[in-house]
Image: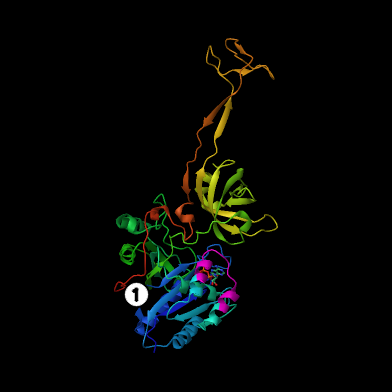
Amino acid sequence: MSEEEIHLGLDDIDSPSGGCTTHFASLLVEYLSKHSVNWNDYPNLIRLNPGIPFRTRGNGAVSLRFTTDTIEPDEILHQIELMINDYVDRLYPNTNPGVVIVTGKIPEAISRFSKKALWRTIPIALAKRIIDEHNLVHYSSGNGRGLIGGLASIGNQLLRDHTYEYIAYRSMDQCGDTRGVDALSVKQMDEKMGDSVFSNVDDKKYRILIEPHGPDPVLYGIRGETAKSVIRAASYIKSEQKVERWTVFRTNQGTGEHLVHTMSIGDLRPYMAAIVHGFVETPPRMMEGGYVIFKITDRKSVIDCAAYEPTRSFRETVMKLRRNDEIRLHVNVRPRSKTHGLTLNVEGLEVLKLSPLIQSLNPLCPHCLRRMKSAGRGKGYKCDKCGFRGATMNKIETHKERPIEIGLYLPPLSAQRHLTRPFARNEHRNSGRPKHLIEKWHSL
Ligand code: ATP
């Protein structure tokens, strides 16, 4: 038996009509805990490139890290295969489960792969090649796409900033009913827990954000800075549906880890998550359907940008941009289609420099201080009140204040990606894998 660390990555074990990868991971945690494995970390919930079109919801993959002298990797894999067959919805063709196991040190190629999976689109063939080259124990079905997330979650050990999420699950046979999470209990929790939790209630403290809306087994998820804080936070939450099981995940949510590459417009490719620095080329316009479009240039190329309806008040901020404003956009690249070219889906806006807004006004009459009227082309200005004529007078240019300031603007919390670093985490960074896990971090 191996005392080396086992890293087990899984993804795409879900369907829109029920199931989700984190829920399956929770079942697996129970199974492995019953086999007395030694947990080296909380399950890692790794969010990958949020723009990937194949995702069901939040593009999350999970990695479990443990040592064991009671059960071999092959045996674990065999058990998982049985569990997956039991679990996934065979009628849903878009489920392509993938499970990968790395024993011992994680190869550099896998760490590089993980970094890429945060912002690029990775072909399944690349995941398969790495798996073959390193002779990794693995399982996949369908087209094997889940191997991408499985492998990527293994390579991201959350060595730098990370956060936690307590996920409570309901029973699978109650997934069609309403969850009934009590909003008041969530608001009270949020107040009591202060900045040890984040993004659980919207900016105006009006809407709760912990309850999903689809027919999946997640009852609610609470995001926070430590395992202890999310567990304590959960003790405040009341819901109509019963919590059947719960697990604490360590995650890259709220870290902004996907947005580290600044790209020139010419190098952008579909589905990339990137930062683009440029200047507003054409001012924003609100389109029918409630989305805002404008163009930016990096002085070499020009590209369309869009802020869509779900980003709500963020669109109003974008509407305040003017030609030549210097900005940095946090984007996901939308591929070209019959109706539009390559488009930047704007998910964050950094205003770096505002172009001056110059207002040009007729001069004031030097006698009665009234604004004068034009006396005709090339004839200067005249005062209607006292009759004064200023044949050589010109228009006066004044700088008008812009209704937007230098700084970072994000969509409201309810419209942010899991990976987006919310304002509440601006000053906050956690680091490193935990040395010890708290005693009880999952139900059983
Ligand atoms: P859930 O939240 O319920 O787990 P999900 O939103 O995570 O669902 P999945 O059903 O897991 O979505 O589908 C995402 C698929 O995209 C997975 O097969 C995953 O391996 C793949 N994938 C993730 N990141 C990338 C990437 N950067 N390039 C290509 N494929 C990716």
User: Which residue sits at x=50%, y=34%?
Assistant: 401
Position of 170 with respect to 404 (left or right) is: left
Label 1 secondary element: loop
Location of residue 128 by image quarter: bottom right
Residue holding disc 1? 443
Q: Magenta segment, which residues?
A: 112-129
Q: Is residue 173 visible?
A: no
The x, y position of residue 251, in whole percent, is: 42, 66
Question: How was this image coloured?
Answer: rainbow
User: Main SS type for the magenta part?
Assistant: helix
* Residue 26 magenta-highlighted: no
Whether residue 218 appears in this view of the structure is yes
In this picture, residue 183 sits left or right of residue 155: left
Q: What residue is drawn where x is 59% and y is 62%?
A: 271
Percent from the top left, x then y, of residue 191? 32, 54
When asked about the image quadrant of residue 44, the answer is bottom left
Amino acid type, mark 1: Ser
Depth order, front residue of 34/91: 34
Where's residue 280, x and y in %?
A: 59, 45
Q: Residues within 10 Å of mark 1 (few under 14, many from 20)?
A: some
In the image, is the residue at mark 1 within 8 Å of ligand 1 by its beta carbon?
no
Q: Is 202 positioned to the left or the right of 369 in the image?
A: left
Identify which residue, 437 or 53, lies in the foreground: 437
Q: Residue at (67%, 55%) from the top-left corner? A: 341
Quadrant in which the N terminus appears? bottom left
